[in-house]
Amino acid sequence: MHAFDVLGDPVRRRILELLADGEQSSGTVSSVIRDEFGISQPAVSQHLRVLRESGFASVRAEGTRRLYAVDSAPLREVDAWLDRFRGFWEQRLDALGTELARGKRERRGQNENENQEEQR
């Protein structure tokens, strides 16, 4: 399965978000996903299996519990693919940063002028 097929599903993206906070038990993941998406535990297990088989998540046994964690290798591949397109938005973000800084300087200057007028 292609990485974007895996990431294209909102349930799987949410599971990865949960796992990004640290290792989680399948029960914890299942509980959150069932509450947020209204799907069954077997459906959550299927999504976890897809993430595991596609390499986005790893699992380890701890007694009877299964603990899932993000595996970053496929995410690095996605990042490398996206790198080709970063230039399209980085220039705009740089320009936005410049405009925000300019606006901040202008507001600071206006506040200083107002304070000086009040003191007179």
Image (tube, rainbow, N blue to C red):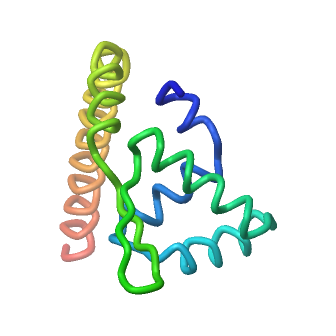
Where residue 2 appears, x then y in whole percent?
A: 50, 25
Above or below — where is 101 with respect to 82? below
Where residue 17 appears, x then y in whole percent?
A: 46, 59
Left or right of 15, for residue 115: left
Residue 86: image quadrant is top left
Above or below — where is 40 with respect to 17? below
Residue 80: image quadrant is top left
Q: Residue at x 31, y 50 (%)?
A: 71
Left or right of 43, for residue 83: left
Above or below — where is 62 with respect to 92? below
As drawn, the residue found furthest toward the bottom would be: 63
Q: Residue at x 38, y 74 (%)?
A: 61
Quadrant of the image for the C terminus?
A: bottom left
Foreground pick, 86 / 38: 38
As drawn, the residue found furthest toward the front would be: 63
Foreground pick, 34 / 118: 34
Where residue 114 appears, x then y in whole percent?
A: 28, 64
The number of callouts visible is 0
Q: Residue at x 81, y 67 (%)?
A: 38
Where residue 52 appears, x then y in whole percent?
A: 46, 50
Q: Residue at x 25, y 29 (%)?
A: 94
Left or right of 7, for residue 115: left
